[in-house]
Amino acid sequence: MQLAFTEAEAAAGRQEVPVGAVIVHDGKVIAQQGNRVEADHDPTAHAEMLAIRQATALLGTSRLTEADLYVTLEPCAMCAAAISHARIHRVFFAAYDPKGGAVDHGPRFFSQPTCHHAPEVVGGMDEQRAAQMLKDFFSARR
Amino acid sequence: MQLAFTEAEAAAGRQEVPVGAVIVHDGKVIAQQGNRVEADHDPTAHAEMLAIRQATALLGTSRLTEADLYVTLEPCAMCAAAISHARIHRVFFAAYDPKGGAVDHGPRFFSQPTCHHAPEVVGGMDEQRAAQMLKDFFSARR
């Protein structure tokens, strides 16, 4: 999760919403990404999506059944569904996101009957740190 | 929608689940893509995601507020949330997808209070044709 925070800080430095994600497979970090929506003009370029794409490209498979994902913010519906499509084993996230999160808020995607794979989920790791980072970012932009 | 079907047929030819998507902006087709999950080893490479990324890259913006998306299958939660992030104006889809769709099924993402932009949606255009294409594809693989 420390590495995910490093990616989130780097994203903030690029004026991106500070979210970072890391994928661990077989005890090794195989992907680490920060949000790049603004830099890439790509609304799908959330940290989790980029990390999933990096990891699947590296392993040459569309499934990450043995992998764990660490992310500094509760995933949105896009990322939650991508996590499910990728069959990720476990998800650890830091801050809860009542406004846009889709794991413990809104659609609660992994609990839907149409969700075909639900990872194990641990939320709230280092929550205060991630929440403060987001708060600082948004208050600096107001 | 005809062009979306052409992309879906091309996807089937590549042994991909036959789904195609097209984005129209200012009366012109600016993106057309078929599902590439298998070819790219990328679980996020649904036709809609690729079309959104193609369109935003072309226009140099992460928002497609004036654009319409045509897709041969009801979007899943990943694609529905990406459509919302991209602020797409209208979505036209062909076949309903009770198993994985997230517009009229499952999380019904656009109706969630945490959905920040809901497009106008028209479902069921040329539904029989799209449903038959998917049925033929899956029965040939059994």
Image (cartoon, coloured by chain):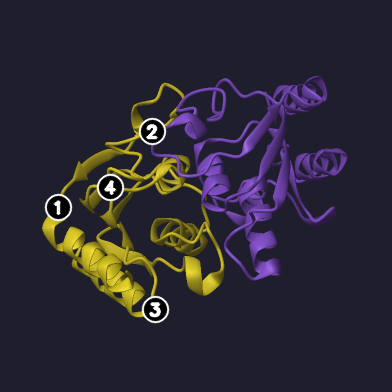
Chain colours: A purple, B yellow
Labels 2, 1: one chain: yes
User: Label 2 belongs to which residue?
Assistant: B109
Local crowd at mark 4 within 10 Å, few (<14), some, or many (≥20)?
Answer: some
Task: Give the residue type at disc 4.
Answer: Asp
Q: Relative to B28, is A86 on the left or the right?
A: right
Using the numbered discs, state the Cα–Cα distance from disc 3 to disc 4 in whole angstroms. 22 Å
| Mark earlier in primary sequence (1, 3) | 3
The residue under the point 57% across, 63% down is A62
Q: Helix, strand, or loop for circle 1?
A: loop
User: Label 1 belongs to which residue?
Assistant: B125
Output the chain of dot 1.
B
Output the chain of dot 2.
B
- Camera-near label (2 vs 4) is 4
User: Label 4 belongs to which residue?
Assistant: B97
Q: Helix, strand, or loop for circle 2?
A: helix
Q: Helix, strand, or loop for circle 3?
A: loop
| Mark earlier in primary sequence (3, 4) | 3
Q: Relative to B96, is A78 on the left or the right?
A: right
Labels 2, 3: one chain: yes
Where residue B90 sits in the image (x, y, percent)? 28, 44
Where residue A100 sits in the image (x, y, percent)? 54, 28
Using the numbered discs, state the Cα–Cα distance from disc 4 to disc 1 in whole angstroms. 13 Å
